[in-house]
Amino acid sequence: MTVKILRIVALLTASPLACPASQAQNENADPAILSGTLSRVKKTGLVRVGYRDASIPFSFLDRSGHPIGYSIDICNAIVEEIGRTLDREDIKIDFVKVTSESRLQAIVDGDIDLECGSTTNNLERRKIVDFSPMIFVSGTKLMVPVATAWRDFHDLKGRTVIVTRGTTNEQALKSLDQKFKLGFTLVESPDHEESFRMVADGKGDAFATDDILLYGLIAQHRAQDRFKVVGEFLSYDPYGIAFRRNEPDLRATVDRAIRNLVVARDIGPAYAKWFESRLPNGEQFNIPMSPQLEEAFNVLGEGAEAN
């Protein structure tokens, strides 16, 4: 992919308020005229953060049961920026568990304020929630037993494929089957951990989800000798932090928080902490930042100064 195309991709997946021309208009919300989420947080001092329990290394539980991960660190930075915006230093976080199926509805219903997991920003989802600038880019691949002979996606013909309910991977597999008439059986599970276990227990031939999540599950279960990730990307999935639509003050605050991480050069160490270093539970990915993500951050930081 050329640099020119990378910049187009980065611009398409960035939030409009991340552009320097609009920063001046949204730099600080007026606490006296707040509405929606920021108004409630101003009164309660509490931000409700939706987390996933097995989306390694984005959002998962440490040995003490506390949510940690790359997306959680970014959401912590957003909460700090909310505190600065509201001129409050005592903002607290209430962590609320969500699943791939419940996460977006939890935002719509007001059960959470930020969804901090591994959520793809696409057109269909932007009809119901808003998204931060891109924080990661992944795509659908397949996990199969190591003994499985594999050439390409045509090898799915006649097989049983597990997908996690409510994910873009499910739609990617349905579209693939409709286009190429592969005739595989698609079976849904409630979460990534259950999807993994279904293949491990022989209830499916493959598990389809974002490649980084597959690597994380294999590492978590120390199953490198049992499973492998195969095939070309079957979808393009830019991740973002999700929050309620039609709240310009909240959107400006989220954009500003991530832009500040980029401009202050904190986003690189945050990425390295979760993707290139050993995790608290002993796993290690050694996955460098992709050119697409690096260019997205470059575009986000152009012409901006950290607050």
Image (cartoon, rainbow, N blue to C red):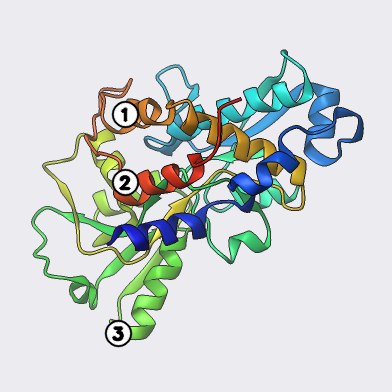
Residue 189 in view in this figure = yes
Residue 61 coordinates in the image, percent (x, y)? 44, 27
The dot on residue 180 is 3
Q: Amino acid at mark 2?
A: Ile
Outermost residue, right direction? 32
Q: Secondary structure at mark 3?
A: helix
Q: Nearer the viewer, mark 1 or mark 3?
A: 1
Q: Amino acid at mark 1?
A: Ala
Q: Which residue sits at x=43%, y=42%? A: 297
- Number of residues whose C-alpha sits closer than 10 Å to that of mark 1, classed few (under 14), some (14–19) or many (20 or more): some
Q: Nearer the viewer, mark 2 or mark 1?
A: 1
Q: Amino acid at mark 3?
A: Phe
What residue is disc 1 on?
A: 272
Closest to the observer, 90 or 94: 90
The dot on residue 236 is none
Disc 3 from disc 2: Cα separation: 26 Å
Say if mark 3 contacts mark 2, CB within 8 Å.
no
Against 69, residue 291 (above or below) is below
Disc 1 from disc 3: Cα separation: 39 Å
Q: Quadrant of the N terminus?
A: bottom left
What residue is disc 2 on?
A: 212
Count up the numbered dots: 3
Q: Quadrant of residue 10?
A: bottom left
Against 288, residue 270 (above or below) is above
Disc 2 from disc 1: Cα separation: 14 Å
Q: Which residue sits at x=23%, y=78%? A: 157
Going from N to C along the chain, the mark reached first, 1 or 3, is 3
Seen in the image, is 145 located left or right of residue 297? left
